[in-house]
Amino acid sequence: ESIQQTRTRVAPKRGLRRHLPRNRATACLTCGTPVCPRHRSADFKREQITVCAECSRFLRADFLADAVDLPEDDRRRLMNSLLDVYDRSVLVLRYSSQFIGDVSESLQSNSRRNTKVGVGSSASGLVSGVTGVVAAC
């Protein structure tokens, strides 16, 4: 490269990293849009399920009762968005169903391993307790 070409090349700005979000937003389980922790539905936050505030209204018990009272254009728009969410959910479930057997096996083996660790630690606690009582007598 010549000196002229290296002078025209622009170096990336290093200060840009300060302005980018530090943690990535996770995707909404129903619609797939990125959701930051601030806009995550509080109802599903306890179960560690990411659902945006927009989609959480579809999952409320009174959703259909509220939808009936809307004007026809709003109701049509709402039903179209509900169908989009439903289509995405069907695709996610069909894709995920391929892996259910593997995930189930993995969870069962982890459960067995954790049970063995729990029994082993309980047995060692019992032995140390008995040893302490014998030493005290």
Image: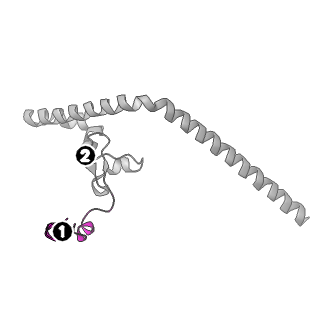
Up-down relation of residue 112 to residue 128 (above or below): above
Residue 11 versus residue 92: which sits nearer the camera? Answer: 11
User: Most extreme residue toward the front, as rendered?
Assistant: 2
Residue displayed at 55% across by 37% down: 106
Apparent side of residue 14 relative to residue 130 in the rendered image (left or right): left
Please provide percent x and percent y for residue 50. 34, 47
Apparent side of residue 125 relative to residue 64 in the rendered image (left or right): right
Up-down relation of residue 127 to residue 22 (above or below): above
The reply to whether the magenta stretch includes residue 31 is: no
In the picture, residue 64 is in which quadrant? top left
Residue displayed at 46% across by 31% down: 100
**Helix, strand or loop at disc 2?**
loop
Residue 53 versus residue 116: which sits nearer the camera? Answer: 116
Q: Residues within 10 Å of mark 1 (few under 14, many from 20)?
A: few
Q: Residues within 10 Å of mark 2 (few under 14, many from 20)?
A: few
Residue 44 versus residue 35: which sits nearer the camera? Answer: 35
Quadrant occupied by the C terminus: bottom right
Please provide percent x and percent y for residue 122. 73, 51
According to the picture, the residue beneath numbered tag 2 turns out to be 33
Please provide percent x and percent y for residue 111. 60, 41
Amino acid under disc 2:
Thr
Up-down relation of residue 66 to residue 20 (above or below): above
Residue displayed at 29% across by 57% down: 38
Amino acid under disc 1:
Thr
Does label 2 or label 1 sit earlier along the sequence?
Answer: 1
Q: Which residues are magenta?
A: 1-23
Do residues under tags 2 and 1 come within 8 Å of each other at their CB atoms? Answer: no
According to the picture, the residue beneath numbered tag 1 turns out to be 6
Q: CA gap, disc 2 to disc 1?
A: 41 Å
The reply to whether the magenta stretch includes residue 13 is: yes
